Image (cartoon, coloured by chain):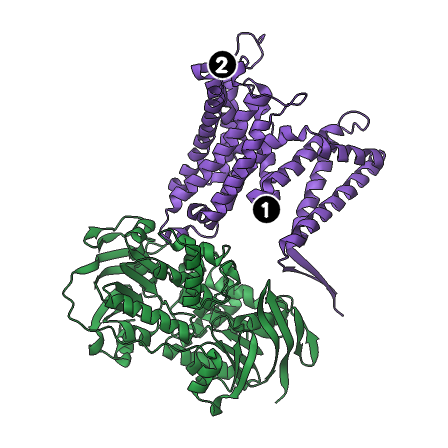
């Protein structure tokens, strides 16, 4: 009889990282080759597409959203709290930034407009997250559900604005606002749709979040929340305040991502589903792929962004497999990535018994 | 006697910590082998390997002449090996009955009577239809014991499970162990209490830093010699003296007035309890486990709601303020369940201490506290879940060393600690009291309560049924009071 047992192991970091990358790459190749054969494509061409996707500078357009959002989520998840509302927090962040840029005099002042818009985006994201966590800590309402539901509220709130009071005068009836003032726009890299400023800010935030979670008492206590609210409380720290703080930071970072979307990419407010575009949900995966380690978030954001580009690339041009297949391939790749994490953490022992 | 089980050249390391280094051991049927060692000497690791919870890095286990490596407790159980561990392995959401049924793999109705008969024999009053999370740590330990004994094992591993049982229960448990031995079973008895090892075992193995440093016939070895082998050169701190019985004129710093607390089901868990602790005083609270002690101390620290009554701290009403605020004003708690309430298992020792510390703490201070408490391994970067039970408790206790408490509410603070460490804790608490601090000591160890307490309160069925001056009562009288109303 075959017996399988799974044993936890701890490998040193300098082995884990190459091991996981190797497994992920092998997995990528296997899934690409299999998919290519099934759909009668030349595996060589597909792999070229894949490699190009990883080298395409357009990935930074996605990293700009995934990095700050997943960074925030990793704070909430470290505390054992389920923030599934990054999507909505991105959307209200965008709404906040648009408000400052378009409807206050600040928007036309150089530098001040940008900073004020982004700060307000932070604040809006935080407020959106706080609503859910307050319900959780004071009334025991599951935060996973409320955050998820609030995504829709955010969508429809913004939809109301762009179809209604905020609809622009020069947009020919499209559901969107007017363009934000030039002073409020962040300069893009020539020929691309991303800007370097938010990217550098995000990298800086990565370091700050790491130092916060691993070096400060409050940050360490946030990570401690996931093992026990009671034990945190008994260490003389208010677990309620910590939970609110963790969620607030989480929402603020997503709000920031939404703000930069307006300032860099859209340059106006568009309907909610177009702003979030599911990136808030994808960020959940980015956060978990990094094992909630802030320093690893840029890496996993890069990885996921590349696959995003890849899934777009194979839907058009010479391959043209269509949206559904593209998604299935990407799904398989992520599955294999998760398998790689499992293999890095556990040893599998097979034994034959007579 | 035939060899039932042989442990052959087993080594186990966790990262850079060597937990066991080339251990070999034979266990014959009908034998009670005590494995003795200080906290972190590798005793529990050995037990966990025998029970299939850990796989050894090197070496193997031989059962009836056949080489085995157990990959899970289910594997070990097939060969009749069962363990009672220092941390109850029960599923919180299920009832006592369901837990035992799962473990024995027998239907509920078939074991219902067996369990009740067993509990009656031990005089344990636990409703087996109640879910595990409503039981105290000690009550869970009883269930753990029942579970193991009902499985009628060939090899029973007892990992520090008897440490805090009342003497009467300990003796009954020992009789049960004898029954197993009489039917050719054998027992590995893991402990850090030398007298226990001498009393209960036929053979004693001493472990230190993962190696066997001595093997003795229990009849031919003295307590002092064992202590020397066990601790090596470590000096034993002198037994603590009774806190000086200076007339206490100061006011009570902690006052509990007529407190009524209900349990999860709305039944009265603590009823009309009034108790006060004065400055410089240690008040011991004793009683048979499950008589409201856990609920009372959780109420004092703020984890439970007070239904009626009042708690005063330095004259201030703290009845309704959350635990973290109580700690901030100097009311510290050594929790009843160290694993759940006392530490963060997924964080490092240094991170735990950092969270406990109310003030900013310097890097050097981590090493100081680790060496003071003799936490093994002495590495602040090690995750707490890798530490042995005793060392986890030391991490819990670090909070009273790095902060400046006014009152310490402690529940079995020396549970799981070896002799050296428990004396350190006892002397720290007595010294703390002699400097004007106050301690409310909930203890299931009567000797400890009597040795340290200025006054002893006895709890039964949620009520304080008597408060005695330590000079006015002795151990056997206390035991009589404890059971009289139970």
Residue B431 located left or right of residue A8: left
Q: Position of residue B339 (x, y in %)?
A: 45, 60
Q: Which mark is residue B40?
A: none
Q: Nearer the viewer, residue A249 or A198?
A: A198
Can the viewer see residue B128 in this picture?
Answer: no
Res. A44 image quadrant: top right
User: In the figure, what tint was chain B given?
Assistant: green
**Callout 2: SS:** loop
Q: Which residue is mark 2?
A: A166
Q: Report in which chain the residue with disc 2 lies.
A: A
Task: Name the residue carrying label 1.
Answer: A291
Packing grade of label 2 (10 A; few <14, some 14-19, many >=20) is many
Asked if A345 appears above or below B102 in the picture, the reply is above
Q: Relative to B11, does residue B31 appear above or below in the rendering?
A: below
Residue B9 found in image quarter? bottom right
Where's residue A164, x and y in %? 49, 13
User: Residue at the location (46% across, 78% down)?
Assistant: B231
Chain A tint in image:
purple
Task: Note whether residue B467 is visible.
Answer: yes
Label 1 and label 2 in one chain:
yes
Viewer-nearest residue: B17 or B336: B17
B50 displayed left or right of B274: right
- The answer to whether B160 is drawn above or below residue A203 in the figure is below
Q: Of residues B75 and A167, which is closer to you in this image?
A: A167
Left or right position of A96 against B49: left
The answer to whether mark 1 and mark 2 are in CB contact below 8 A is no
Which dot, 1 or 2, sits closer to the camera?
1
Instruction: Identify the secondary structure beneath mark 1.
Output: loop
Is residue B178 toward the left or the right of residue B51 in the image? left
């Amino acid at each position: 009889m075959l017996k399988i047992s799974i044993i936890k192991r701890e490998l040193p970091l300098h082995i884990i990282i190459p091991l996981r990358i190797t497994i992920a790459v092998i997995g990528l190749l296997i899934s690409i080759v299999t998919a290519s054969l099934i759909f009668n494509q030349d595996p060589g061409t597909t792999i070229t597409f894949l490699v190009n996707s990883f080298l395409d500078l357009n990935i930074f357009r996605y990293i700009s959203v995934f990095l700050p959002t997943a960074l925030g989520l990793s704070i909430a998840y470290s505390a054992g709290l389920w923030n599934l509302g990054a999507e909505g927090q991105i959307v209200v962040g965008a709404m906040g930034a648009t408000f400052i840029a378009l409807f206050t005099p600040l928007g036309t002042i150089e530098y001040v407009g940008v900073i004020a818009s982004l700060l307000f985006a932070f604040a809006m994201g935080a407020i959106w997250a706080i609503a859910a966590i307050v319900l959780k800590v004071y009334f025991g309402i599951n935060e996973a559900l409320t955050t998820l539901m609030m995504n829709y509220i955010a969508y429809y709130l913004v939809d109301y604005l762009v179809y209604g009071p905020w609809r622009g005068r020069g947009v020919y009836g499209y559901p969107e606002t007017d363009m934000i003032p030039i002073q409020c726009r962040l300069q893009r890299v020539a020929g691309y749709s991303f800007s370097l400023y938010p990217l550098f800010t995000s990298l800086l935030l990565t370091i700050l979040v790491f130092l916060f979670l691993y070096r400060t008492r409050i940050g360490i206590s946030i990570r401690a929340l996931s093992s026990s609210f009671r034990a945190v409380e008994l260490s003389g720290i208010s677990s309620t305040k910590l939970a609110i703080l963790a969620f607030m930071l989480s929402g603020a970072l997503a709000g920031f991502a939404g703000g930069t979307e307006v300032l860099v990419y859209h340059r106006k407010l568009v309907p909610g589903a177009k702003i979030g575009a599911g990136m808030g949900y994808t960020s959940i995966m980015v956060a978990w792929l990094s094992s909630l380690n802030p320093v690893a978030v840029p890496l996993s954001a890069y990885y996921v962004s590349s696959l995003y580009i890849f899934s777009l690339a194979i839907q058009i041009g010479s391959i043209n497999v269509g949206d559904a297949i593209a998604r299935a391939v990407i799904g398989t790749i992520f599955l294999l990535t998760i398998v790689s994490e499992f293999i890095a953490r556990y040893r599998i022992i097979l034994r034959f018994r007579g | 006697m035939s060899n039932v089980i042989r442990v052959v050249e087993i080594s186990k390391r966790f990262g850079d910590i060597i937990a066991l280094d080339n251990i070999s051991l034979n266990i014959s049927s009908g034998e009670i082998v005590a494995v003795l060692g200080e906290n972190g000497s590798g005793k529990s690791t050995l037990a966990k390997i025998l029970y299939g919870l850990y796989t050894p890095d090197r070496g193997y286990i031989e059962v009836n002449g056949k080489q085995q490596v157990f990959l899970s407790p289910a594997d070990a159980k097939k060969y009749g090996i069962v363990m009672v561990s220092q941390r109850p392995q029960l599923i919180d959401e299920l009832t006592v009955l369901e837990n035992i049924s799962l473990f024995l793999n027998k239907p509920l109705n078939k074991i219902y009577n067996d369990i009740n008969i067993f509990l009656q024999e031990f005089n344990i009053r636990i409703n087996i239809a109640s879910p595990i999370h409503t039981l105290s740590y000690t009550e869970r330990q009883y269930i753990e014991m029942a579970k193991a004994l009902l499985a009628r094992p060939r090899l029973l591993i007892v990992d520090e499970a008897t440490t805090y049982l009342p003497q009467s229960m300990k003796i009954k448990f020992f009789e049960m162990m004898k029954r197993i031995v009489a039917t050719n079973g054998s027992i590995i008895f893991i402990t850090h209490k030398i007298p226990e090892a001498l009393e209960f075992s036929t053979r004693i193995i001493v472990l230190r830093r993962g190696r066997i440093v001595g093997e003795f016939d229990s009849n031919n070895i003295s307590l002092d010699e064992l202590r020397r082998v066990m601790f090596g050169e470590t000096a034993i701190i002198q037994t603590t003296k009774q806190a000086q019985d200076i007339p206490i004129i100061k006011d009570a710093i902690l006052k509990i007035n007529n407190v009524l607390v209900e349990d999860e089901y709305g039944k009265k868990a603590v009823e009309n309890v009034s108790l006060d602790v004065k400055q410089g005083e240690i008040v011991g609270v004793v009683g048979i486990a499950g008589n409201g002690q856990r609920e009372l101390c959780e109420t004092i620290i703020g984890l439970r709601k007070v239904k009626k009554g009042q708690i005063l701290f330095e004259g201030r009403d703290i009845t309704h303020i959350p635990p973290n605020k109580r700690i901030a004003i100097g009311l510290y708690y050594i929790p009843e369940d160290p694993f759940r309430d006392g530490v963060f298992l997924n964080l490092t020792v240094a991170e735990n201490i950092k969270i406990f510390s109310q003030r900013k703490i310097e890097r050097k201070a981590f090493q100081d506290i680790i060496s003071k408490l003799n936490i093994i391994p002495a590495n602040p970067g090690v995750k707490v879940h890798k530490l042995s039970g005793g060392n986890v408790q030391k991490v819990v206790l670090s909070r009273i060393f790095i902060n400046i408490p006014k009152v310490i509410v402690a529940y079995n603070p020396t549970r799981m600690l070896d002799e050296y460490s428990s004396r350190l804790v006892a002397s720290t608490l007595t010294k703390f009291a002699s400097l004007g601090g106050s301690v409310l000591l909930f203890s299931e160890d009567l000797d400890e309560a009597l040795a340290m307490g200025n006054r002893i309160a006895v709890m039964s069925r949620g009520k304080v049924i008597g408060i005695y001056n330590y000079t006015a009562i002795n151990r056997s009288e206390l035991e009589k009071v404890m059971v009289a109303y139970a």
